[in-house]
Amino acid sequence: MVKTNLDFELTLWKEHNLIVGVDETGRGALAGPIVVAAVILPIYFRSPLIQDSKILKPWQRNKAYEIIRQKALEYSIIIKSPREVENKNPLQATKEAMVEATLKLKNKPSLCLVDGKEEIIISGIPTQSIIGGDRKSINIAAASIIAKVTRDAIMKNLHKKYPRYDWENNKGYPNPTHLQAIFKHGICSLHRKTYEPIKSLVSGKMDKQEIARKYNLIT
């Protein structure tokens, strides 16, 4: 694990004692929900295990998850279903969830740090978008861990109902095993029909042979 210096808040904490970090997971998946978490850590809080969730091993994420649950002043989680992602588009559904997760907090933060380049607007709360924020801000890193562990648990549970898609391992993302299962068995109600190659498969825009060639699938 390559640790990063999550010191973005060091100067901000001098003026803001309640900083919330917000992050999402699942936006690029073909199936399952988008999960957004908002976390407020105590001022000047430090833990070597709280890093960007993507660079942590599963056992490290789980341990960090428990630390955050115990030490955070507060956190909240918002889940957007596949249908909401389709109807509102992935970006809009994510931004909406980020606002909802922040407003769900009992304590009103004085500053909201958001991972990514897209800006969100929250009435009465200044926001700052940070590209690569989960490797710069400890609050955003904590939110990435809460979101990731929560969504992974959801996908592992859904795997029991739909084992053919191997969601226990791919978490709904478009790896070869998942794509091959979609090609062979079709989709289920938890797939996002606005995502490729599902969109082309369902609409008939591309036939199966074209899809198979494009994604190197076995016919």
Image (cartoon, helix red, strand yellow):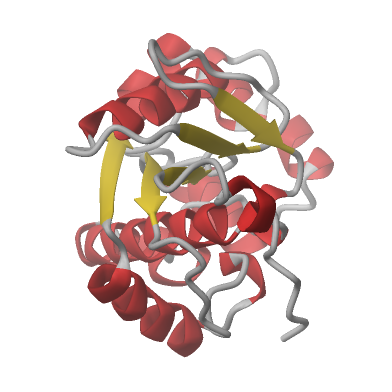
Corner quadrant of residue 20: top left
Percent x, y of residue 124: 39, 14
In the figure, is residue 41 to the left or right of 208? left
Name the quadrant containing residue 67: bottom left
Please name the residue shown 43% across and 11% down the image: 88
Which one is in front, 104 or 53?
A: 104
Query: Is residue 147 among what the camera can see?
Result: yes
Count of marks placed on residues = 0
Q: Is residue 81 visible?
A: no
* Residue drawn at 42 percent across, 79 percent down: 64
The picture places residue 11, in percent across and down from the top left corner, at 68, 51
Residue 161 is situated, as x and y percent measured from the top left of the image, at: 20, 59
Q: Quadrant of the N terminus?
A: bottom right
Q: Is residue 60 above or below residue 72?
A: below
Q: Tell me residue 151's x, y (percent).
A: 36, 56
Residue 152 drawn above or below residue 58: above
